[in-house]
């Protein structure tokens, strides 16, 4: 167990439920049970997000990183599926896809603040990097994510992960939260650890009114799939530490810092 806010039995049951949820929802989508193009986009987004939640939950349960990698690699096909269903929207409704594919400056999608899609994207990239995904797979993920030249942090991360020809933004989608982490990318080496520490310390509290999963550890009745608790991990911090060479020993131990994903020890 890496996360002890819930019991092993909780995570075991959750992982069975989420596996069943992904399989049954995908089967229903494949069978044509969702009739409108916008409904199919909604469902494809849900499956994609569930796949990310599943990978994080396996990490929380204590799975070997090879297992976490397996589930992380599966996310790409679900993200491609989302774009494919967005492509099938009627021409007059193509703008609808922005709420699902654009990571900033958009309206909420199905009642979820847009920052959630940004956070989940960073989690996906963090797990890909930390579990040693092949470069061709990372390239495909970056390509489907897009957003070149839109967010300085995402551009810096993508550049470090191999997309070194992309346009680089000068501003952040969510500066109130992500400014310290972006500064950690660009700061002098001796300043990077403190900036990452600062980000980890404030990360969860700043997401209180924004993240779908905030306080989900206290939810007894799951009415929406985002109510399920998968673990509170500041995966973005591990990603930046890894791509900038910050050693684990220079970071303050924190319950939300995923130590096992840090590569410089």
Image (spheres, grey):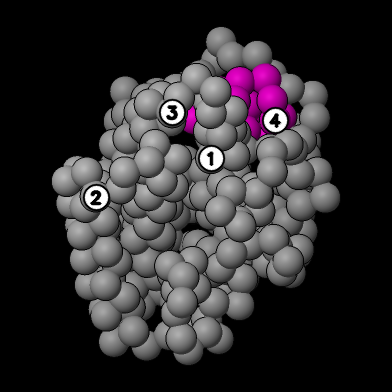
Answer whether residue 161 is visible to the viewer in this image.
no
Query: Relative to residue 38, is residue 56 depicted above or below?
Result: below
* Quadrant containing the N terminus in the rendered view: bottom left
Disc nearest the viewer among 2 and 4: 2
- N-terminal label among 1 and 3: 3
Q: Magenta part of the protein: which range?
A: 145-159
Left-right relation of 200 to 122: right
Q: Which residue is mark 3?
A: 89
Q: Which mark is residue 33?
A: 2
Disc 4 versus disc 1: distance between alpha carbons? Answer: 16 Å
- N-terminal label among 4 and 3: 3
**Where residue 67 sits in the image (x, y, percent)?**
23, 56
Left-right relation of 157 to 78: right
Q: Which residue is mark 4?
A: 151
Q: Which mark is residue 68?
A: none
Disc 4 versus disc 3: distance between alpha carbons? Answer: 26 Å
Disc nearest the viewer among 4 and 3: 3
Disc 2 versus disc 3: distance between alpha carbons? Answer: 17 Å
- N-terminal label among 2 and 4: 2
- N-terminal label among 2 and 3: 2
């Amino acid at each position: 167990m890496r996360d002890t806010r819930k019991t092993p039995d909780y995570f075991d049951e959750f992982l069975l439920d989420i596996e069943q949820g992904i399989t049954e929802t995908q089967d229903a989508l494949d069978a044509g049970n969702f009739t409108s193009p916008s409904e199919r986009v909604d469902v494809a987004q849900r499956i994609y997000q569930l796949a990310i939640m599943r990978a994080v939950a396996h990490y929380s349960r204590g799975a070997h990183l090879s297992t976490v990698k397996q589930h992380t690699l599966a996310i790409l096909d679900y993200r491609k599926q989302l774009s494919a269903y967005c492509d099938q929207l009627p021409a007059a409704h193509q703008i609808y896809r922005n709420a699902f594919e654009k990571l900033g400056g958009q309206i909420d999608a199905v009642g979820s603040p847009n920052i959630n899609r940004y956070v989940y994207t960073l989690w996906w990239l963090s797990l890909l990097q930390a579990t040693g995904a092949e470069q061709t797979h990372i390239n495909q993920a970056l390509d489907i994510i897009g957003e070149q030249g839109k967010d300085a942090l995402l551009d810096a991360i993508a550049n470090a992960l191999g997309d070194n020809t992309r346009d680089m933004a000068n501003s952040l989608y969510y500066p109130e939260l992500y400014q310290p982490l972006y500064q950690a990318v660009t700061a002098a080496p001796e300043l990077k650890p403190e900036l990452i520490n600062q980000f980890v310390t404030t990360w969860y509290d700043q997401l209180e009114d924004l993240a779908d999963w905030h306080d989900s550890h206290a939810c007894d009745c799951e009415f929406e799939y985002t109510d399920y608790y998968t673990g509170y991990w500041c995966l973005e911090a591990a990603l930046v530490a890894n791509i900038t060479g910050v050693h684990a020993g220079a970071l303050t131990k924190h319950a939300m810092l995923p130590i096992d994903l840090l590569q410089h020890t």
